[in-house]
Image: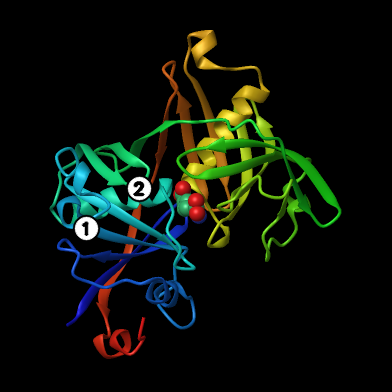
């Protein structure tokens, strides 16, 4: 059996895309990790398994509202609730493949149904849901530097630390330490943030299950709301939406928090290649 794939990215958060409408391809954690390996496989921060909701046990219940399920996996093979850059690339793929048209569509994810708008100019806006702020206080440490971190849950967990200089985060070859023990029982994505101007920040991120990436959509949303609260801005209180520009190593995302708390993320999505996975290689993975 030959397996088609595409390669795409959203602000350089890159993905292997595996279209599999009927959920017929066995994609265990080891197979995903090898496919995402930049030397042994195709290479990517994560994998987008494109499945009809009705064909996936985790998404069947959403099939009435969203025809397609984004079965997202991190590059190490682990499963995550949501991927903000991934959902834009996923929507772009669906449009390119002729499954949907520009305009509005609903995508099923493990973090629930996400409403997506594909603009004619190519940028994609996703309603990412509301942020939750778990109350635990956390500290993030890299080398000799420690910072208090704000907990933000965007469907997946984030620790947002405001730093003086993004270089303080070091090389990020290993995950930053978080304390107290047990504050993130399922692991965490860690964002480091500096100010760039009015409602404009820059960030780096160390992603759970991946490592440092050049962008993270849920991370940018977490950073926008954490920065808004730090700046004394809460749309539910002020009665006005607030928009932040977030610069990441791989590009720029624009995040708006509406008065009802819904967070909208706008950014690009790109497909760079398509091809076929060697069936001999894939079958011999034994994964
Ligand atoms: N890059 C993603 C986030 C992917 C999931 C994350 N690594 C996790 O484990 O929660 C994004 O763009 O949001």
Image spot of residue 63 (x, y percent): 17, 44
Whether pointer 2 and pointer 1 mark residues with C-beta atoms closer than 8 Å, the reply is no
Does residue 263 sit above or below 163 in this rendering? above
Image spot of residue 148 (x, y percent): 75, 38
Q: Residue at x 15, y 63 (%)?
A: 22
Q: Residue at x 40, y 37 (%)?
A: 266
* Image-based side of 237 in relation to 180, left or right: left
Using the rendered view, name the quadrant where residue 208 is placed. bottom right
Quadrant placement of the C terminus: bottom left
Q: Residue at x 52, y 31 (%)?
A: 132
* Image-based side of 145 in relation to 6, left or right: right
Quadrant placement of the N terminus: bottom left
Question: Mark 1 highlights which residue?
Answer: 51
Using the rendered view, name the quadrant where residue 46 is placed. bottom left
Image spot of residue 67 (x, y percent): 16, 46
State the residue in front, 60 or 236. Answer: 60
Question: Mark 2 highlights which residue?
Answer: 110
Image spot of residue 280 (x, y percent): 27, 91
Per the image, label 1 sits on a secondary structure element best described as strand
Comes first in the chain, label 2 or label 1: 1
Kindly tell me whether mark 2's CB lies below 8 Å from ligand 1. Answer: no
Kindly tell me whether mark 1's CB lies below 8 Å from ligand 1. Answer: no
Crowding at dot 2, Cα within 10 Å, few <14 / some 14-19 / many 20+, comes out as: some
* Image-based side of 38 in relation to 159, left or right: left
State the residue in front, 165 or 257. Answer: 257
- Kindly report which numbered mark, 2 or 1, lies closer to the viewer in this rendering: 2
């Amino acid at each position: 059996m030959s397996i088609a794939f595409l390669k795409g990215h959203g602000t350089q958060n890159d993905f292997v895309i595996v279209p599999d409408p009927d959920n017929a391809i066995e994609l265990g954690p080891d197979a995903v990790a090898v496919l995402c390996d930049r030397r042994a496989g195709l290479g990517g921060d994560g994998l987008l398994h494109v499945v009809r909701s009705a064909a996936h046990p985790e998404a069947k219940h959403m099939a009435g509202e969203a025809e397609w399920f984004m079965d997202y996996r991190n590059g190490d093979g682990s499963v995550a609730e949501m991927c903000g850059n991934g959902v834009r690339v996923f929507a772009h793929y669906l449009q390119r493949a002729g499954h949907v048209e520009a305009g509005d569509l609903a995508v099923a994810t493990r973090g629930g149904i996400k409403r997506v708008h594909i603009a004619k100019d190519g940028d994609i806006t996703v309603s990412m849901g509301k942020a939750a702020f778990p109350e635990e206080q956390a500290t993030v440490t890299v080398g000799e530097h420690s910072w208090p971190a704000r907990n933000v849950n965007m469907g997946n967990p984030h620790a947002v630390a405001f730093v003086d200089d993004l270089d303080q985060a070091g090389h990020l070859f290993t995950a930053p330490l978080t304390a107290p023990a047990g504050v993130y029982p399922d692991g965490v994505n860690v964002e480091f943030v500096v100010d760039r101007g009015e409602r404009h920040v820059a960030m780096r991120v160390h992603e759970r299950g991946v490592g440092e990436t050049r962008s993270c959509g849920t991370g940018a949303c977490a950073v926008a709301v954490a920065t808004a609260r730090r700046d004394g801005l809460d749309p539910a209180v002020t009665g006005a939406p607030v928009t932040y520009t977030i610069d990441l190593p791989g590009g720029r995302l624009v995040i708006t928090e509406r008065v009802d708390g819904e967070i909208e993320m706008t950014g690009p999505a790109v497909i760079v290649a398509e091809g076929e996975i060697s069936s001999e290689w894939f079958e011999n993975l034994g994964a």
